[in-house]
Amino acid sequence: MSMSPLIDELVAAFRCLPGVGQKSALRMALYLLERDREGGTKLSGALSRAMVDVKRCQQCQTFTEAELCGICASDRRDPKTVCVVETPSDLQAIEQMGLYEGTYFVLMGHLSPLEGIGPEEIGIDRFCKLIDKNECTEVILATNPTVEGEATAHFIADMVKSRNVLLTRLAHGIPVGGELGYSDGSTISHAFQGRRPFA
């Protein structure tokens, strides 16, 4: 049942978020209207400013308001080591560890011919120019262990092979706390391939 045109519009706006259905969208809309109008106004302003001012870093393609993101602009990062990730959230996951001191290249997706996403759409040309310009010594492939992620990693590897660059891949395998009996064959295969000496 329709409540009012403006409420319907607000509910429809919330539904653009991933995983938000009609009931969740209605609940969020009514919560803001009923209990937190100030929060709703703040959300509206932040969303409006972000949609206008946030763009892609000219070097790594992650989101930023500046020409270069904080990582690319930092003189404390090693520009000769580049970690290739699919999304800005993958970049954030690696940054949270606080161990990696190189730079990134964010593909904003992966190769998917069925969806019309080819090398141009994920910026492979820009990536190749970046590693040549920075005279990179290592490229870390940190795409997701999905069929598309693996295909993307292999495509990038083929592009990089002709350059004098060390190509590495994040190890995939049994998670901490996981049991072999509950792991699929592909996960166990990756775990064996990524094994290293026991210290």
Image (tube, rainbow, N blue to C red):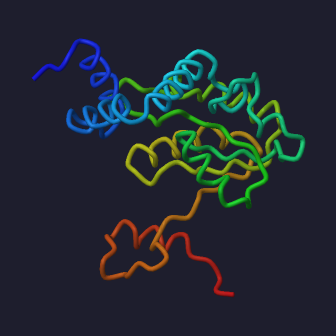
In this picture, residue 134 sits left or right of residue 193: right
Residue found farthest to the left: 1
Question: Residue 51 at what x, y percent from top left?
Answer: 54, 19
The residue closer to the viewer here, 194 or 32, is: 32
Q: Quadrant of the N terminus?
A: top left
Residue found farthest to the bottom: 199
Residue found farthest to the top: 5
Residue at 61 percent of width and 48 percent of height: 92
The residue closer to the viewer here, 175 or 186, is: 175
Question: Residue 42 at what x, y percent from top left?
Answer: 54, 27
Residue at 56 percent of width and 64 percent of height: 171
In this picture, residue 145 sits left or right of residue 6: right
Q: Quadrant of residue 71?
A: top right
Question: Residue 129 at what x, y percent from top left?
Answer: 73, 27
The residue closer to the viewer here, 30 or 133, is: 30
Q: Quadrant of the C terminus?
A: bottom right
From this view, report whether residue 185 is shown above or below residue 18. Answer: below
Residue found farthest to the front: 35
Residue at 74 percent of width and 56 percent of height: 100
Q: Quadrant of residue 187?
A: bottom left
Numbered disc total: 0
The residue closer to the viewer here, 147 or 21, is: 21
Q: Quadrant of residue 12?
A: top left
From this view, report whether residue 77 is shown above or below residue 44. Answer: below
Question: Residue 79 at what x, y percent from top left?
Answer: 82, 42
Residue at 40 percent of width and 51 percent of height: 146
In this picture, residue 14 sits left or right of residue 4: right
